[in-house]
Image: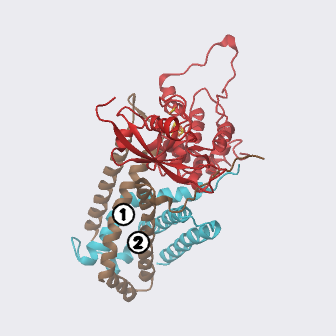
Amino acid sequence: MSARRPYVRSMDGWWKRDAYFISYMAREVTAVFVALYAIVLLFGVVRLSQGEAAFNGWLQYLTTPWMKVFHLIVLAVFCYHTWSWFNIMPKTMPIIFFGGKRLQPGTITGTGLVASVVACLAVLLIVRGMS
Amino acid sequence: MKRSNEPIFWSLFGAGGMLAALIGPALVFITGIAVPFGLIFKPDTMSYAHMLAFSQNWLGKIFVLAVIALFLWHAAHRIHIVLHDFGVHAVTLVRVLCYGGAFVGTVIAAYTLLKL
Amino acid sequence: MADTEKIIEIQVLRYRPEQDKEPVLQSFKVPFTDDMSVLQGLQYIKDFLDGTLSFRWSCRMAICGSCGMMVDGKPKLSCKTFLREYYPQGLRVDALAHLPIERDLMVSVEDFVTKLESIKPYIIPKEPRTLEQGEYLQTPQQRDMYEQFSSCINCMLCYAACPQYGLNPSFTGPGILALMHRYNADSRDGGQAERNELGYADEGYWGCTAVGYCSEVCPKGVDPANAINQNKMASAINYFTRFITPGGAEK
Ligand code: SF4
Ligand code: FES
């Protein structure tokens, strides 16, 4: 009989074991807020289809203190999402050579963040122009 | 080895994540903060008339649907992974709830927008 | 020897299958000098304090990949980690996380080796050449596409850093998928279709959730997270186009 008795350790609470895992989990949990925000918008669309009074009720709801606090949190979470999204982006890209030199991870992340700032400003300007 | 069906969900996850990363902060700022707090934009920016006109336009419809649906699919994928990471073993149930939720949300949004 | 001899406390997670029901911590006081590695600290324990302590090592110079362990909770090569960094608070040494403990600081390598063999870790020539036709040529840039992924020393630190492997050991895991990519990305190789049967499965690229810690702990700069995740796009494109590309549907 074999004297071997390999011991398998539990994975319970693994994500608390390392600061790296905590930031990974933070990145993943942003999704809860993305979902909640999408649901708020979905309600808006449904309310819109039910006529002016219903839609104004939804608009009114957005100005309640709870919803204001909620959206401030969502804004912070979305900013973290943007940062973490472009932070992991270099890992998802093949090795690219640019003029004989390898495209560096920092360049990819930086380009993404700049693109995001530009896109956000564009959205703000367009909405301002439309209203 | 069985080919994974992840590409379907991963593609939606990626599209939603990219959209959220690029314009998410601006959208949240406008709909959740600037307009309700009465900052920067004119008070009627999100008025019934404006929003209705926006959502009756084909480009507007597509945009609203893309934001709502892709955000939901993005979130569904990640929440499903988070539950797996936390050690929830009811894999099928988790999948049905996450992706089912995103699917229902997409259908409601698409149907409502089409009707407008 | 330094003028004043320093003593450091090393806590070691012991597991002796014949007597311990589960792993237990044992503490040792080890005299050390600034040039001593964690591995040398363990060797001191084995030589002078407790001869029954078991751990693996060979090269003592970060190239054989046998001495991986958790040093204060981080996956490290113990020959490349120095005791002085943990002075005066002391340190704790565990067997590599996520892998079954065989004895003390030695983990079971069975799963890793079986998977390693399964990915055909050798070049499957795209076009067979006879000896007379000479060698396979490659440009420096073609080499750069895989070179970093070929630096793996099979130390399994990335496995100890990968929660997905810990949660589900049927996932092939970072190091071996990186090695798979190393061959797939080689311009001389034609084995992609064979290997990607695993790559495109849940046990392959899709088992990864892009935590990224594997790349952080790798002592050789392999970047397994990049090797895996850069394949997801190709795998997805293949998924959607397999019915319209000739011969794609059978796979
Ligand atoms: S990829 Fe790096 S960490 Fe993983 S086994 Fe190879 S050398 Fe070790
Ligand atoms: S003893 Fe060879 S890598 Fe540490």
Q: Quadrant of the C terminus of chain C?
A: top right
User: In the figure, is residue C225 to the left or right of C167?
Assistant: left
Chain A's colour is brown
Name the element at disc 1. helix
Query: Label 1 is placed on what type of residue?
Result: Phe
Q: Position of residue C99 (x, y in %)?
A: 59, 48
Q: Which chain is displayed in cyan in the rendered image?
A: B
Query: Label 2 is placed on what type of residue?
Result: Tyr
Residue at x 55% of width, y 59% of height: A11
Q: Which residue is mark 1?
A: A78
Q: Position of residue A34 (x, y in %)?
A: 43, 67
Q: Chain of mark 2?
A: A
Name the element at disc 2. helix
Badge 1 or badge 2: first in the primary sequence: 2
Q: Which residue is mark 2?
A: A37
User: In the figure, is residue A121 to the left or right of C79?
Assistant: left
State the residue in front, C55 or A16: C55
Is residue B46 in view from this perspective? Answer: no
